[in-house]
Amino acid sequence: MARAIAYLAENFAAQPSLEDAARASGISPFHFQRLFTRHTGVSPKNFVAHLTLERAKESLRLGETVSSAAWQAGLSGASRLHDLSLKVEAMTPGEYAKGGEGLILAYGFAPSLFGTSLLMATERGLCGLAFGDDEDAMLADMVSRWPRAKFVRDDAKLAPYADKIFSGAKGALPIQLFGTPWQIKVWDVLLRIPEGKVVSYSDIAHSLRAAKASRAVGTAVGRNPISLLIPCHRVLSSTGAITGYHWGTTRKRAMLAWEAAKHDEVSA
């Protein structure tokens, strides 16, 4: 289904039909419809309808910012984020400069709706989640965040995390966040954006009482180490344009459309 989602996200402007998507996936339209709906929780038609992100743009036009009632709802609703158990560690400048020295990070790869995922964890919880198509490039990118840490591949250790994130397995998901005090503040705001909603970088800056810090907010959002779960993909430009997603704007568009479609089907 990752291939189907990528195809639809790349070609949504042409409004691909069920037959087009099924052909790209190499299966019959009948089986494609059933498999897509079973694995994603939304129909192909609903997913394509939301890929234009008109819902996201309308939310911004209507002023649904971080001060809205929906924002204050935080982690409630259909999202599984309420299952997260966070261990937050804001680093001092000295600790940040050490680049993860003394840390032992296990990592592993797993398939997902949005391509190959790379998961990383300490003994205390998940500390990294990335998406891409090139495992070596993904690993190099994440290693650069903690250049002095020790990395050990252990797919079995990361499998339970992948199951909870991508298969809906029950139970709390422990997460350990490492970041500067400013980054932690921005990531905390990201956690409060409900599924199916979007905000702008300036909205986040205003919520932190730093109205002129949109650029600094953007930098902190881009350094979010746990994509999807800490939903940096829900931040758009003030015009509603999709910009600046570390793992690719096509993937960001697909994530937003998937969440909006799920939100619609739950609300129906």
Image (spheres, helix red, strand yellow):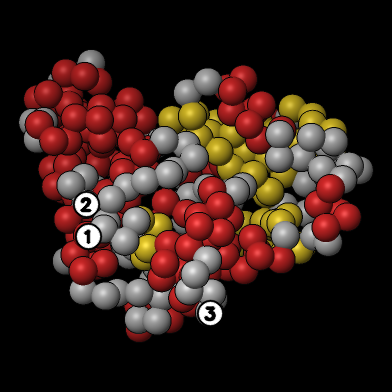
**Horizontally, is 267 left or right of 211 in the view?**
left
Identify residue for label 2.
53
Viewer-proximal residue among 244 and 102: 244
Asked whether the beta carbons under mark 1 and mark 2 sit within 8 Å of each other, the answer is yes
Q: Is residue 190 visible?
A: no
Residue 209 image label: 3
Classify 37 as above or below 196.
Answer: above
Mark earlier in primary sequence (2, 3): 2
Residue count near mark 2 (Cα–Cα under 10 Å), binned few <14, some 14–19, many ≥20: some
SS type, badge 1: helix
Give the amino acid type for the residue marked by disc 3 in the picture: Arg
Q: Quadrant of residue 149?
A: top right
Mark 2 → mark 3, Cα distance in angstroms: 28 Å
Say which element carries label 2: loop
Q: Residue at x 43, y 30 (%)?
A: 115
> Is residue 265 or residue 221 the one in the foreground?
221
Q: What residue do we see at 40% from left, 81% from top?
A: 67
Left or right: residue 194 versus residue 30 is right
* Closer to viewer: mark 1 or mark 3: 3
Residue beneath label 1, please? 57
Instruction: Give the mark, 1 or 3, whose residue is nearer the N terminus.
Output: 1
Say which amino acid is labelled 1.
Answer: Lys
